[in-house]
Amino acid sequence: MSGARGFTLIEISVALVIGALVLAIAAPALSRLNDRVRFNARLQGLEDGIAALPRLAYATGDEGSLQDLAERHLDIPKGWSLVGAENIFIKRNGLCAGGDVRVIAGQSERQLELAPPFCTVKEGS
């Protein structure tokens, strides 16, 4: 057969098997990466919400501990907790004493350093 061109059934089968193996190896790593990206996005959203609480206190005239305000105004994911937030007080005028808060989310933990007077999250914390 001088004019026959194309791939044999064995060549196509080998290529499919190799592709399936690569996919089977890569799928769990991609799933873990996706979970990590979602976690970081939720954590960033919570950090942004915490940083916005002094402005919210000023706008609404609400005051209280960071813990109280966070429970009333933020969407804290189920199973997550703020440790040390009960010691940080935010006044009606939006001023905050600052301090350290640990965000605990299951097996993960993140330390946030909140800088006075407006409880901004310090970089690198």
Image (cartoon, rainbow, N blue to C red):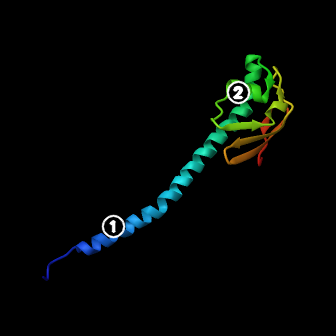
Task: Identify the residue at horizontal 73%, vertical 23% (top origin).
Answer: 56
* Residue under pointer 2: 71
- Check disc 2 and give the amino acid type: Glu
At horizontal 56% and vertical 54% (from top left) the residue drawn is 33
Marker disc for residue 86: none
100 up-or-down from 117: above or below: below
Residue 76 percent coordinates (x, y): 66, 33
Q: Is residue 113 depicted above or below 8 in this figure? A: above
From the top left corner, tell me how far across and down residue 6 is, in percent. 22, 73
Identify the amino acid type marked 1: Leu
How many residues crowd mark 2 within 10 Å: few (<14), some (14–19), many (20+)?
few
Which part of the image, by quadrant, shows the N terminus?
bottom left
Q: Which residue is mark 1?
A: 16
Q: Is residue 85 left or right of residue 32?
A: right
Residue 16: x and y, percent? 33, 67
Q: For the view shown, which residue lies furthest in the left direction?
A: 1
